[in-house]
Amino acid sequence: MATAKKTTTAIEESPAEKVTKTKAKKSIFNLFLFWKNLKKQYGRRPKLYLGGVIILLIAIGIFFLFWFNKGLFLAGNINGRIVTNLQFYNDLKKASGQKVFDSIVHETLIKQEAARLKVSASKEDVDKKIQEIEKRLGGKENLDMALAQNQTTVEELREQFTIQVLVEKILEDQLKVTDEEVNKYIADNKEATATAKLSKDEIREAVKTEKLNEKFGPWYEELESKAKIIPYF
């Protein structure tokens, strides 16, 4: 009976399990003791203790942010070689930084001028432009193909049309098209208008577009000359 009791005890808890439990208890105790000593150490200076906790939490937050979203810090990995976002954007800036900056300036100045004049582009205005280009290309599928070929999304196209609508509204008085101008356009482009089977409304839009291209350059140059633009690259 005594032997059986010893065997049962051995099965219930082996020496290895005892060591593991002892280590676990010791680890938990050490961690508890560490925080206890930390609190005791900085108990007389609570602001310093609180600052240390905040710094620790920030460090943990940055670690998890980096771990789960490397794209915020890294551009890629090439056979183990890390490419940082800083390196990537520095090279990108050298290659086409001025072009991208000029594009941002262009959109920003137009939007600022539109806001100053209380001019806006509604969703209906932009939808109308999308529908016009769809019709011209022969349907939505053809528009999607054209966008794909030009590596442009519908959202980017909508943004372009938003800018165009704003400019058209700002220069509205200079873009009015008379019947005489429509008739002159037809007379000067007989073959093109006949082949394309353009309606008078479509021809009026074509004349308006020509006027827009003519008036926009000088207007924008004047707008840009009055602006304070400071690049930092």
Image (cartoon, rainbow, N blue to C red):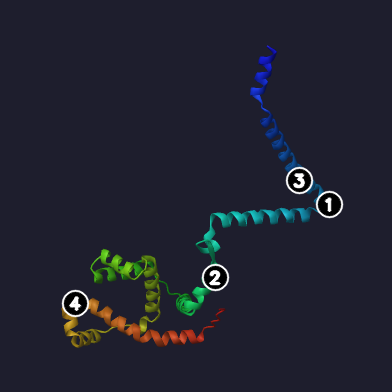
First in sequence: mark 3 or mark 1?
Answer: 3
* Figure check: 1 above or below 213: above
Instruction: Give the camera-side residue of 49 and 85.
Output: 85
Q: Amino acid at mark 3?
A: Phe
Asked whether, in this view, residue 115 is left or right of residue 202, the answer is right
Disc 4, SS: helix
> What residue does disc 3 label?
34
Instruction: Give the camera-side residue of 129 and 31.
Output: 31
Please tell me which residue is depicted at 23% across the width and 79% down the height of the picture.
203
The tag on residue 87 is 2
Please tell me which residue is depicted at 68% across the width and 16% down the height of the picture.
5
Q: Nearer the viewer, mark 3 or mark 1?
A: 3
Q: Position of residue 130 (x, y in %)?
A: 31, 68
Q: Nearer the viewer, mark 4 or mark 1?
A: 1
Asked whether, in this view, residue 49 is left or right of residue 186, the answer is right
Whole-angstrom CA distance, mark 2 to mark 4, is 50 Å
Disc 1, SS: loop
Q: Amino acid at mark 1?
A: Arg
Q: Residues within 10 Å of mark 3 (few under 14, many from 20)?
A: few
First in sequence: mark 3 or mark 4?
Answer: 3
The tag on residue 196 is 4
Say if mark 3 contacts mark 4, CB within 8 Å: no
First in sequence: mark 1 or mark 2?
Answer: 1
Whole-angstrom CA distance, mark 4 to mark 1, is 87 Å
Q: Position of residue 177 (x, y in %)?
A: 28, 83
Q: Quadrant of the C terminus?
A: bottom right
